[in-house]
Image (tube, rainbow, N blue to C red):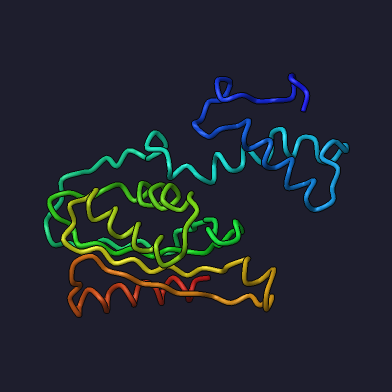
Amino acid sequence: MSQHSQITQSDSKDSIDQEKAQKATRLLLEAVGEDPDRAGLTETWQRRVPEAFATLTERTRDSEKPTMQTFDAEEGNLVIKTGIPFYSLCEHHLLPFYGTVDIAYRAGSEVVGLSKLTRYVRWQSHQLTMQERLTNDIASGLADELDAPMVTVEMNGIHLCEAMRGIETKSMTTTRTAVGEPTEIERDQFQAAIDRDGDRR
């Protein structure tokens, strides 16, 4: 590996070890029989894969966490946002899983701007994880951030580790979790919002 081609930790604007990422990617390319120095692959291990993993693991760095600015609100109101896109990495195969997240929370004394929910989901998703854990992370994290007495999260994901290997079948996986206890009315309102959003797609 030439000296000028390396991106060192001190040169990096993020906190992943760029040099290790370069070496690991180069070794992986060699392991599958590729030549890392051929024209189409030099930028792959020198820059593209390290930069991609820096983005896709932002959840490990608090500096990347979005600011959750809140506003005064009437307590007890139910806030629902559906169809939030997410993209994450399966910790078992380092392959993507992706889909949509639906969120409902019962406001305490404050609410957060709706765009911040999307940014928060994006940040939480950028880690090596499993769908079940990610669903819980989003729900428990929002409950803490908003001091909300109830947060419900539903996640619908397609896993490329299932679609691209093994049985090679593309299917949807749904997980749902709640922090606090939603009322029957809140459950019905949340489900109705999800159904309406599904009809629009």
Is residue 38 placed above or below 153 in the rendered structure? above
Residue 165 horizontal side relative to residue 66, left or right: right
Say which residue appears at 55% left-offset and 61% top-offset. Answer: 92
- Residue 190 or 158: which is nearer the viewer? 158
Rendered location of residue 8, percent (x, y):
61, 24
- Residue 43 or 146: which is nearer the viewer? 43
Residue 74 horizontal side relative to residue 131, left or right: left
Is residue 111 placed above or below 66 in the rendered structure? below
Residue 110 horizontal side relative to residue 23, left or right: left
Rendered location of residue 96, percent (x, y):
59, 59
Rendered location of residue 17, percent (x, y):
56, 32
Say which residue appears at 34% left-offset and 51% top-offset. Answer: 114
Residue 68: name its quadrant.
Answer: top left
Say which residue appears at 74% left-offset and 24% top-offset. Answer: 5
Say which residue appears at 20% left-offset and 78% top-offset. Answer: 185
Is residue 63 placed above or below 29 in the rendered structure? above
- Residue 78 or 174: which is nearer the viewer? 174
Q: How many marks?
A: 0
Rendered location of residue 36, percent (x, y):
81, 40
> In the rendered view of the protein, which quadrant contains the N terminus?
top right
Residue 114 horizontal side relative to residue 5, left or right: left
